[in-house]
Image (cartoon, grey):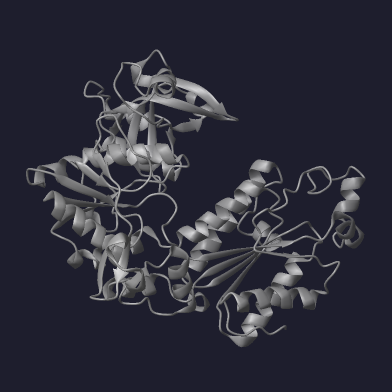
Amino acid sequence: MSAGWVLPEGVLAQAPSYTPRPAELADLELLLTGAFAPLTSLPTSTDLRSISAHGTLADGTPWPVPVTLEVPTELISQLESDNPLRRALILTDTEGAPVAAVDVMDSWPTRDGMSGVGGPVRAMGESPRWAFKALRRTPQQVRDELPPGRVVGVVADQPLHRPQLAQIVHATRTLQAHLVVMIPTAGPPAAGLSSEALVRCVLAADDRLPTATVVTVPLRRRANEIHDALIRARVAQSYGVTHLLAGGPTLSGGGPRVLVPRELAYDSRDGQWRGRDDIPPRNQRAALTATEIDDLLDRGFPLPEWHTPPAVAKELARARPPRRHRGVVLFFTGLSGSGKSTIARGVAASLRETGERSVTVLDGDIVRRNLSAGLGFSKADRDRNIQRVGWVAAEIAKHRGMAICCPIAPYAAPRTEARAAALAAGAGFLLVWVATPLAVCEQRDRKGLYAKARAGELTGMTGVDDPYEEPADAELVVDTTKLSIDEAVGTVLGYLEEHGWIETARVA
């Protein structure tokens, strides 16, 4: 986005291209639209060191949080750092359409095979066909429409129930301010909702708010709470916000003033929400917790009207139906010979008998022959295989089916990605670790793989010369040395029934 950086289209057409990760694409859009002002380029390595040490870019411009982009190191080798016409890199969206070009003025190694890049960027191509595109406005467009005076900003990363609505109304009326509601649409979903469902839930509460400007913003939640708060404040300021209604850390440095809302309670005397200290204890009713709301939705119970406006409750019920009607990924992991595929097929057969679930089984061997044909057994190929399984499973679950997966899935990171993909689709994810010990699996060795590995005829065998990272986040653990297959199938079905994913449990 450097005003002086202009490259001929023919040069850009010949430049190498790369699709960044979704989180990086979200940050890139914020940079290109001016939401990261005063940041106008991808920070260089010198900038990043200065941000870490002083909270400024290398030229002294205040900027509090690192913004980074990683690309394969092999792409860097194709660029000519001393030739402005040969150092452009095209960045594409997940569908391969160009979204930006970066003039790579600096690069540095970050991890195996990847390098960070810094330099000016400029937008390319037409804007994508976003859902709720009318709400995806630039900061400049929003600022041009704001009335003079104070502006209260809210980052609506959760549906707005009556307590939150009361806090917003109180702040805007007290300050006599205009309201800007920013709905984040990047990163992990809020409350098990897709970004589109979150937007619908927030819009359903629109009639309960003062005249408001509602925008969708590709904000993502960062792992560092302080960084997250600082970025939100900066982005809010770019949209013209003078007062940000938010909990969390108190921020300084010229951004909007942070308003920490009072804790409210429901007053049973007149049905209003007030500060807890203003209500006699016998008349107080605390707001529902997120866990209580989730439990009601999971079981298919209506959200009470005293807590949630009916229009919001309707959207939430539509987006998060009861578990027995919601999509779910049932992901088995374990060593070869552990019994995971046999258990998975038994669970699928039982559910097909009852007919209450649409079931798709993604067996490890079948996936290898079809979806992942051509992949080997290196760590990179194994990760790619699980990424493909996770993506297909999430698509099945998005449409309220049950995907039963049973690969070995030896590494924790791809399993975590598969969970995230399912949750982003608004579905459930249940990890079942079939924890049959290696010695027992070797005794079974139905395919003869362990014998070949021990004889040196096969390399990369999980449990022999390649590690299996035991899950620390499994919802259910079964061991077929202690249970028969029928008992293991019954255990899984019992868990599904107990937690509301099915109504009946029958062992096939």
Q: 46 or 180: which is nearer to us?
A: 180
User: On screen, 80 above or below 296?
Assistant: above
Toward the left, the furthest residue is 148
Residue 478 screen position, x and y as percent: 76, 66
Q: Residue at x 43, y 65 (%)?
A: 289
Which quadrant is home to the C terminus? Answer: bottom right
User: On screen, 170 above or below 380?
Assistant: below
Whether residue 78 is visible here, answered yes or no, is: yes
Residue 142 screen position, x and y as percent: 16, 45
Which quadrant is home to the N terminus? Answer: top left
Q: Residue at x 37, y 15 (%)?
A: 83
Q: 389 or 242: which is nearer to us?
A: 242
Q: Residue at x 79, y 66 (%)?
A: 339
The quadrant holding residue 302 is bottom left
Residue 467 screen position, x and y as percent: 76, 45
The quadrant holding residue 271 is bottom left
Whether residue 134 is visible here, answered yes or no, is: no
Residue 287 screen position, x and y as percent: 37, 66
User: On screen, 493 above or below 184?
Assistant: below
Q: Residue at x 29, y 39 (%)?
A: 233
- For residue 348, side relative to residue 298 (left or right): right
User: On screen, 7 above or below 298?
Assistant: above
- For residue 175, side relative to residue 408 (left or right): left
The quadrant holding residue 403 is bottom right
Q: How many marks?
A: 0
